[in-house]
C-alpha cells in the first residue's frame, strides 16, 4: 500500500491510459471535438483527414484549398477500387463543425467519385462521423473525408 501512495502519478497515468483505451474504440471514432479527433485510438489535430473503406487513415492538408482537394482525389482516393459491383460504398464528406460549411467539394469531383463506385453524402463533420461509426460498427465498408477546422 505504501508503494501506491509513493507512486500516485504512475497510478493516475495508468487509470487515464485505461480510460483512454476504452473510450476510444478500435476502427472507429472516440473523442470528437472541433480541431481534435481520435480515430482508431490515434489522435489527429491540425490536419483534415480521409479514411478509406479499409480503415486506413490519411492526413490531408487544408481541404478548403482546391489544390489540396485534387491531391486527395489523385493520391489517396483514386488508389482504392470498389470490388463489389452494383453496390456503391458510402463516402461521407464532413464540411466542418458547428454548422460552418468550410469545405465545398466541386461537382466534377463528386461525379468522379460516383464513377469509381462511391456514393458521396455531404453533411456536417459531426453527422458524418456519427454515420461512419454506425456503419463501421455493423462491419460495413464506408469512407470518410473530414474537415476538422
Image: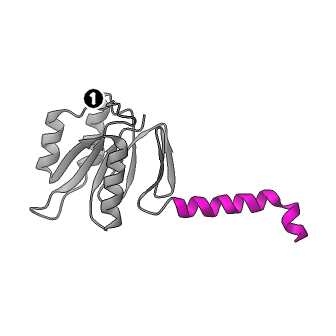
Q: Secondary structure at mark 1?
A: helix
> What quarter of the picture does the C terminus occupy?
top left
The residue lying furthest to the right in this view is 2
Per the image, the residue denoted by label 1 is 66
Query: Position of 23 compared to 145: left or right?
Result: right
The magenta stretch is 1-23
Q: Give percent across and percent down for residue 69.
A: 28, 35
Residue furthest to the front: 99
Residue 133 appears at what percent x and percent y?
Answer: 36, 58
Residue 13 point in image, percent of width and height? 71, 58
- Is residue 3 magenta-colored? yes
Q: Is residue 48 left or right of residue 83?
A: right
Residue at (27, 41) in percent of width and height:
123
Q: Residues within 10 Å of mark 1 (few under 14, many from 20)?
A: some
Q: Quadrant of residue 67?
A: top left
Who's the residue at 66% across and 58% down the image?
16
Asked whether the viewer can see residue 54, the reply is: no
From the viewer's perspective, tell me whether residue 1 is left or right of residue 17: right
Q: Toward the viewer: 129 or 83?
A: 129
- Magenta stretch, overall SS: helix
Query: Can residue 115 be found in the magenta stretch?
Result: no
Amino acid at each position: 500500500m505504501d508503494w501506491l501512495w509513493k507512486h500516485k502519478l504512475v497510478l493516475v497515468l495508468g487509470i487515464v491510459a485505461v480510460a483512454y483505451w476504452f473510450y476510444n474504440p478500435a476502427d472507429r471514432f472516440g473523442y470528437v471535438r472541433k480541431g481534435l479527433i481520435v480515430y482508431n485510438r490515434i489522435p489527429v489535430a491540425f490536419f483534415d483527414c480521409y479514411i478509406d473503406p479499409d480503415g486506413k487513415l490519411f492526413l490531408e492538408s487544408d481541404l478548403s484549398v482546391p489544390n489540396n482537394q485534387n491531391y486527395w482525389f489523385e493520391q489517396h482516393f483514386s488508389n482504392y477500387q470498389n470490388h463489389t459491383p452494383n453496390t456503391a460504398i458510402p463516402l461521407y464528406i464532413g464540411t466542418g463543425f458547428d454548422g460552418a460549411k468550410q469545405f465545398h467539394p466541386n461537382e466534377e469531383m463528386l461525379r468522379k467519385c460516383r464513377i469509381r463506385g462511391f456514393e458521396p453524402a455531404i453533411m456536417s463533420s459531426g453527422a458524418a462521423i456519427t454515420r461512419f461509426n454506425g456503419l463501421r460498427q455493423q462491419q460495413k465498408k464506408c469512407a470518410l473525408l473530414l474537415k476538422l477546422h
